[in-house]
Image (cartoon, helix red, strand yellow):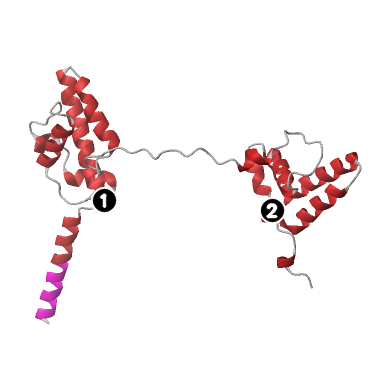
Amino acid sequence: MEYNTTRAKLLLPEYGRNVQNMISYAMKIEDRDERNRASQAIIEVMGQLNPHLRDVDDYRHKLWTHLFIMSDFKLDVDSPYEIPKRESLEEKPIQMDYPKSKINYGHFGQYTEKILQASANVKDENERKFLSLIMGNYMKKQFLKHNNTAVENTVIAEKLSELSNGKLTLENPDEDLISTNQLLKTLGLKNSNNRKSSNSNHKKQYKKKQYKK
């Protein structure tokens, strides 16, 4: 009995040993035309075994590349595509540095801070007021996504002014900003403070019922 541990290593296990054996047999065919026909037949089998590759762009090119890989780049046939080289496939990609940037307040997001910093270029007073309202409400919404409890409007106004270097301000935060409950509804969230008070009320009512009994 032959065990897998004694057999040759499968270079692409997803195609199975039978395909690997067919490629090994094709490599031994001396007649080039017959070897080409055998390779075409193997490609068809590989495509049937991995139908998901048909969703990949130029999947037949990928099959031919796999064919040469499984032959250890020793199969000499006429390929409809450029024959790949071992060095090009084994070449490691260039390492990319992970972008590093300092964020003062993570819950507001990096792009929010960039927009507020760019607000220094806005000269028109009406445009600055409009931008203050839009960004103030957006910052409040971003805050509530991370902490769906009550947030002081004055805090949002302070952070808006801080991150815009004093260029964007809210004179009446409580009037200018949308209410917390309304924002939570648009986000599909519930105020956790309301849930706590609701739970405590249910507990009190339950205790009263028990006491009456």
Residue 107 located left or right of residue 51 = left
Q: Which residues are magenta?
A: 202-212
Amino acid on which the number 2 mark rests in the picture: Leu
Residue 7 located left or right of residue 165 = right
- Residue shown at 81%/40% (left/top)? 76
Answer above or below: position of 172 versus 119.
below
Residue 206 located within the stretch drawn in magenta: yes
Task: Name the one closer to the observer, 4 or 157.
Answer: 4
In this view, the residue farthest toward the left is: 171
SS for dot 2: loop
Q: Quadrant of residue 207?
A: bottom left
Q: Nearer the viewer, mark 2 or mark 1?
A: 2
Amino acid on which the number 1 mark rests in the picture: Leu
Label 2: few (<14), some (14–19) or many (≥20) C-alpha neighbours in 10 Å: some
In the picture of the structure, the residue carrying the numbered disc 2 is 11
SS for dot 1: loop
Q: Quadrant of the C terminus?
A: bottom left
Label 1: few (<14), some (14–19) or many (≥20) C-alpha neighbours in 10 Å: some
